[in-house]
Image: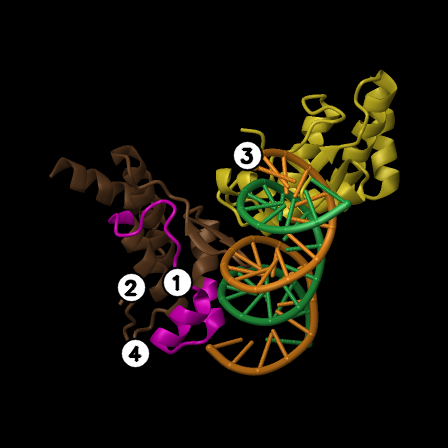
Chain colours: A brown, B yellow, C green, D orange
Amino acid sequence: MLVTLTPGSPEPIYDQIAASLRRSIAEGRLNQGDVLPPARVLAASIKVNVHTVLRAYASLRDEGMVDLRPGRGATVIADTNTPDARVRVAVTALVAEARKAGVPDDAVFEMLREQLRG
Amino acid sequence: MLVTLTPGSPEPIYDQIAASLRRSIAEGRLNQGDVLPPARVLAASIKVNVHTVLRAYASLRDEGMVDLRPGRGATVIADTNTPDARVRVAVTALVAEARKAGVPDDAVFEMLREQLRG
DNA sequence: ACCTATTTGTCCGTATGTATG
DNA sequence: CCATACATACGGACAAATAGG
């Protein structure tokens, strides 16, 4: 299963979906040019409304991770083939997560600094 | 590459193709009598469906820029050999872009006026 | 002038995201 | 989060024009 949900989680469903796909891209399981499942298909497989999936896809589009078009579907733009590119994607994912969690920028920097040091 | 696409652009693919070719004609890279690549060939080269290219070709035909026929392909009609003709083609291109962008005619006139003055 | 194969656009239906309520 | 109407893009079968024999 490309996307798995956690029932009962306070996190909105569309956020869970987006986060799951973001990880897949960051980890290289989804590469540039790959096409995500049609929203209607993914929606049916995890038993949510099409628009909930589309909202997740729209988030990824706004982050510049995918190209989203009627008739075409969601195509991964993010280049995950070069190490440099993977870093950028990872950063995008980090920022998205931080924003969602409400963590201030300073704190994110601090956490990164610590991790880099260790 | 005769036509290049911009992934992630909100502009429809067929519009991107048409605009690209319109510019090529306006700039004289494509002249009267030249034939555009067969739709299937161009489609393959930019990894898009044949019909998406054909829709772009049809737009150019409706603007009177090309002659489109089965078995013949798309032949440039627009005369780009005289300075006067190039101006007319450029105007066609401008109008197409303005319509697409939803710019009111008045505004287009104003923009032109300013540029001409400068 | 004819036939056939090939090339190339046209037509009709389907899939998919977008916009609005 | 759901339902409906719509524009974009795709896919397959068809018809027109061309070229070779």
Q: Residue at x 84, y 17 (%)?
A: B82
Label 1 resides on the chain identified as: A
* Crowd rating for badge 4 (residues with CA inside 10 Å; few <14, some 14–19, many 20+): few
**Residue A100 percent coordinates (x, y):** 37, 58
Amino acid on which the number 3 mark rests in the picture:
Thr
- Marks 2 and 4, how far apart at CA: 20 Å
Earlier sequence position, callout 1 versus callout 4: 4
Amino acid on which the number 4 mark rests in the picture:
Gly
Q: Which residue is mark 3?
A: B4
Q: Residue furthest left?
A: A118
- What's drawn in magenta, residue-wise? A26-55
Q: Which residue is mark 4?
A: A8
Residue A25 lies, with reference to residue B18, above or below; the image says below
* Crowd rating for badge 1 (residues with CA inside 10 Å; few <14, some 14–19, many 20+): few
Label 4 resides on the chain identified as: A
Q: Which residue is mark 2?
A: A2
Identify the element where label 3 is drawn: loop
